[in-house]
Image (cartoon, rainbow, N blue to C red):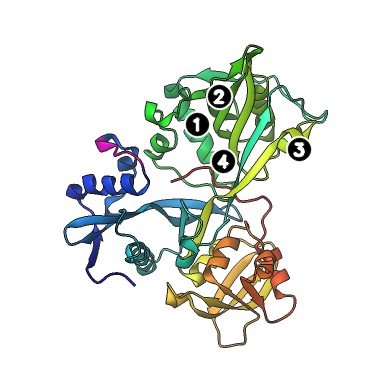
């Protein structure tokens, strides 16, 4: 429960310096001033600050986005960002007040989905967000590796160009691809400046971005200088690789693998990135998985029908949601021909779970059968967890390539 001395409201222009200071202090960074990239994307009518008297001590904001969900559908979602609490004011309910204000406001506005990236893994499940809704892999691989004989590389020309020439083309490719990839988000104008910001402070000792265009895709990367007396072995740090065809994907990876003076490629990419199966020695491709997007069903009955499902199912779900109590209770979840309906019921539950478990499974990122083994899902009627697991799975692993 929040401290009774605290108050919360949307921010105005005069709050921006304090808003940024609290963010910087909470994340142990430096105050970036008026050129902060976050100021370009913050929607001030959806940004909240918590005050202790006149002192600003907590921040959070929602960004209006679309996310691609299974079935190639676009679903509106609130992207939760810049959640911070000023040091010295923790454990007073500041974060809970921010989360409650956001989720209850979304419920009142008819917004069914929320999502975030978590700075710490132990915080957000208590607010109903499901971990590993999408996962991400840090991939590292040496250059000069050969593809297996079945991979064809075309003679398409790949050009390194300026940022100004690349951006219009990249926007078109990204918009075309993101509607086909589960977990990808829409981008507004200033999102490109945030996601591909190229100030000196953003580079962490690496070069500026290199932009390379293929007729059917693009790749963006930085270079980290490396090498010894044996010669240069620079590292290519890929930020984004977007392709409209599988052929472009093979061509661009071959382009990176054959880069002169380079020794290693690193890339935060999808867990099921097929490069592991394209090279002739997959053991040289090292992958380390981590959680990425956390999904939250603000309204269970409106969120579940937003996506398509892989098989028919008819189960009564008993959902626990102490933070958004309108979700608690029993729901009949029925899928026919990929389309879901969700209605209140008093019938006995086939499966019990909390709303965070539904968030983990919503995009197909976590199997409900795994959550059952983890004591997060309880099966009352045999066979229903397996049936639900199959229904929620998608063709590919969900992947969100950008932090917001």
Q: Residues within 10 Å of mark 2 (few under 14, many from 20)?
A: many
Res 277 label: 3
Q: Residues within 10 Å of mark 4 (few under 14, many from 20)?
A: some
Q: Given the current orientation, which residue lies at the most extreme right position?
A: 149
Helix, strand or loop under label 1: helix
Res 170 label: 1
Q: Residues within 10 Å of mark 3 (few under 14, many from 20)?
A: some
Residue in front for this viewpoint, 26 or 327:
26
Q: Is residue 384 left or right of residue 97?
A: right
Sequence-wise, which precedes: disc 2 or disc 3?
Answer: 2
Sequence-wise, which precedes: disc 1 or disc 3?
Answer: 1
Task: Quadrant for residue 273, please give it.
Answer: top right
Q: Is residue 213 left or right of residue 45?
A: right
Res 213 label: 2
- Check the image and report above or below for 72 versus 238: below
Highlighted range, magenta: 29-34
């Amino acid at each position: 429960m929040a401290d009774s001395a605290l108050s919360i409201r949307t921010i105005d222009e005069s709050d921006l310096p304090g808003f940024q200071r609290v963010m910087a202090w909470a994340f142990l960074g430096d105050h970036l001033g008026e050129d902060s990239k976050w100021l370009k994307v913050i929607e001030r009518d959806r940004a909240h600050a918590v005050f202790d008297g006149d002192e600003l001590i907590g921040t959070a904001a929602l960004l209006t986005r679309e996310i691609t969900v299974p079935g190639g559908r676009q679903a509106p979602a609130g992207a939760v960002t810049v959640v911070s609490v000023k040091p010295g004011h923790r454990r007073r309910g500041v974060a809970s007040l921010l989360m409650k204000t956001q989720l209850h406001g979304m419920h009142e506005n008819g917004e069914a989905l929320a999502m975030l990236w978590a700075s710490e893994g132990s915080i957000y499940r208590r607010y109903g967000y499901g971990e590993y809704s999408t996962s991400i892999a840090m991939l590292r691989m040496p250059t000069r590796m050969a593809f297996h004989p079945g991979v064809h590389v075309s003679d398409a020309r790949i050009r390194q160009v300026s940022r100004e020439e690349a951006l219009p083309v990249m926007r078109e490719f990204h918009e075309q691809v993101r509607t086909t990839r589960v977990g990808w988000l829409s981008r507004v104008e200033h999102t490109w400046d945030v996601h591909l910001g190229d100030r000196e402070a953003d580079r962490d000792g690496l070069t500026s971005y290199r932009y390379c265009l293929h007729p059917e895709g693009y790749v963006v990367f930085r270079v980290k200088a490396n090498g010894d007396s044996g010669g240069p072995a620079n590292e290519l740090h890929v930020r984004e690789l977007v392709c409209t065809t599988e052929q472009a994907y093979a061509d661009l990876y071959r382009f990176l693998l054959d880069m002169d003076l380079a020794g290693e490629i690193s890339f935060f990419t999808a867990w099921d990135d097929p490069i592991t199966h394209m090279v002739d020695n997959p053991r040289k491709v090292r992958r380390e998985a981590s959680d990425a997007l956390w999904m939250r069903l603000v309204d269970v009955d409106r969120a579940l029908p937003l996506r398509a499902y892989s098989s028919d199912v008819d189960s009564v779900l008993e959902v626990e949601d102490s933070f958004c109590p309108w979700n608690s209770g029993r729901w009949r979840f029925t899928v026919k021909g990929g389309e879901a309906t969700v209605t209140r019921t008093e019938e006995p539950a086939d499966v019990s779970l909390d709303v965070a478990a539904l968030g983990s499974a919503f995009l197909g990122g976590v199997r409900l059968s795994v959550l059952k083994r983890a004591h997060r899902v309880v099966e009352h009627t045999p066979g229903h967890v397996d049936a639900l697991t199959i229904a929620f799975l998608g063709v590919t692993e969900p992947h969100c390539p950008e932090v917001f």
